[in-house]
Image: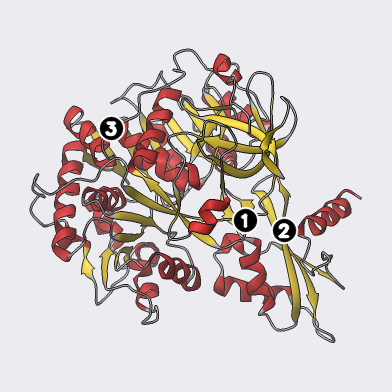
Amino acid sequence: MTNYTPRPWLASYADGVPHEIDLPEGSLGDLVQHSVEEFGEHVALEFFGATTTYAHLGEQISRAAEGLRLLGVQKGDPVALVLPNAPQHIVAFYAVLRLGAIVVEHNPLYTPRELRHQFEDHGARFVIAWNKVVATIQAFPADVAVETIISVDVTRAMPLLTRTMLRLPVAKARDSRAALTTKVRGTIPWKNVVAADPIKDGIARPGADDVALLQYTSGTTGTPKGATLTHLNLTANAAQARAWVPTVKRGTAVVYAVLPMFHAYGLTLCLTFAMSMGARLVLFPKFDPDLVLAVVKKRPATFLPAVPPIYERLTKAAQAQGVSLAGIEIAISGAMPLSADVVEPWEAETGGYLVEGYGLSETSPVLMANPVAPNRRAGTVGLPLPNTEVRVVDPDDPTVERPSGEAGELLVRGPQVFGGYWRKPDETAAVFVAATDDGDDWFRTGDIVRVDADGFVCVVDRIKELIITGGFNVSPSEVEECLRAFPGIADAAVVGLPDDHSGEQIVAVVVLEPGASFDESAARAYARESLTAYKVPKRFVVVDELPTSLIGKVLRREVRTRLLDERES
């Protein structure tokens, strides 16, 4: 073991960014309450033009917390949220936390199989769900612990005129309404929950070290695991983000929520950072360039977190429609590599910055970002945030530090780093190492990086074999398991190949059973029944055999290398 030494990245910080910050005290609820008290009359949320002030948001959170308490939600209970970006999502999130219960975020587009797997792991008895996915949850088998489903009609948060238009007896209105809401039975309507009296001050609040969130992630084994994030992890990461953009003043920012808030990246930069800033959070249920540009015309974003394909599509749509993007000040890109082909036209159109950052679900998620300043460095994920330390070590022996400039595994520590996986002590122990003699544990990211002399970090490779497509993690094992069940497929290896638009394209290399023929369209349709659309392979390759190790394990890296070699030749 070695002593941990210098932090060269500090000299590269933008003007006004502190080297260290004071860590917040209290809970995530306090974070919002401060904005409620300071900016009560300011707009907190905007949804299809309908607005909610901070004062009203605070009242809704208080009433929803009491409504949930009356239903039996208690401190420490996991409460599942299966919601799109909508005002009800923010209220539900903070109402659950007010009780000291634990939020468990879910992708509402997940298939029944994917949702069930996570529910079996966390065991939540209470679910707050978009009414479009209620039937999926109600179809869970009896051994899944769900007892109470609270259904949310997101159209109730829209302006009255919009709701009226959705009820028009015309095909377009019917289609739009069907995409947003449906009738359900056997649930408690969300409107009943928020009709409760405000919660009394005497009801105990959670502490900084209490678990606030289970954020599911795919680990090195491909098995989804719930990363337990405390109130301190999340409030600290929001504070680090605020410190990184000192030019953005509290109470003045406009933040666009085009990223899904069930994703760790969207959750921190929209649900926590934006609320702590007293910002106006403009909510989009899904990314639609036309919807975003309509808002840009009226009120450009101060802060727009997204992924490269969103910036690319928005730039092209703005140019095609003659809409100016000027005034969008800061865009933070994450989840996949950001190329100069995206940055240059974006910055030319907006006059602002587009910089890349980096993080993981286990780190709340943001660990580092490029300076929002002229010294930003393309091709890197930037610098560690304040109070964040990094080391580069030998992947085979993480107690051995690699020389400066040499590639190695990234180890990190900081207030945003999680404490472990939900009910998985062995998996938790495997990702922490005491790599220095000060006794503090460091988190093993599984990523191979190189740090230059100025402290900028470049991601070289991943030890983990996760595929990142469109900003979402995809476990190859999960896709392979699905494909092996398809008639005629004897074995499969799933890998990601570089793609300019999505980061990585999912490719399935399959071996057929003797005498079988292969119908790619049928295989893709079969996979779509069990997997979310972004997990379905975009391309299939049929081979006679897959490369394996001496113990018979398929060597995905070799499969990927062969495909890349073929593409180059």
- Tell me if label 3 and label 2 are in contact, CB under 8 Å: no
- Percent position of residue 141, x then y: 40, 81
**Secondary structure category for the residue under label 3:** loop
**Secondary structure category for the residue under label 1:** loop
**Left or right: 153 as drawn, with respect to 337:** left
Q: How is the image coloured?
A: secondary structure
Alpha-carbon span between mark 2 and mark 1? 14 Å
| Number of other residues with Cα within 10 Å of mark 3, as a class: few under 14, some 14 to 19, many 20 or more | some
Instruction: Give the residue at mark 1.
Output: 220
Residue 175 in which image quadrant: bottom left
At 37% from the left and 57% from the top, the residue drawn is: 104
- Percent position of residue 261, x then y: 41, 48
Instruction: Give the residue at mark 3.
Output: 25
- Amino acid residing under circle 2: Val
Q: Nearer the viewer, residue 526 or 114?
A: 114
At 60% from the left and 37% from the top, the residue drawn is: 435
- Tell me if label 2 and label 1 are in contact, CB under 8 Å: no
| Number of other residues with Cα within 10 Å of mark 2, as a class: few under 14, some 14 to 19, many 20 or more | many
Earlier in the chain: of badge 3 and badge 2, it is 3
Q: Quadrant of the N terminus?
A: top right
Residue 56 in which image quadrant: top left
Instruction: Give the residue at mark 2.
Output: 495
- Amino acid residing under circle 1: Thr
Q: Is residue 179 above or below residue 337?
A: below
- Percent position of residue 237, x then y: 41, 35
| Marks 3, 2: nearer the viewer | 3
Residue 343 in view: yes
Q: Nearer the viewer, residue 25 or 185?
A: 25
At 49% from the left and 33% from the top, the residue drawn is: 323
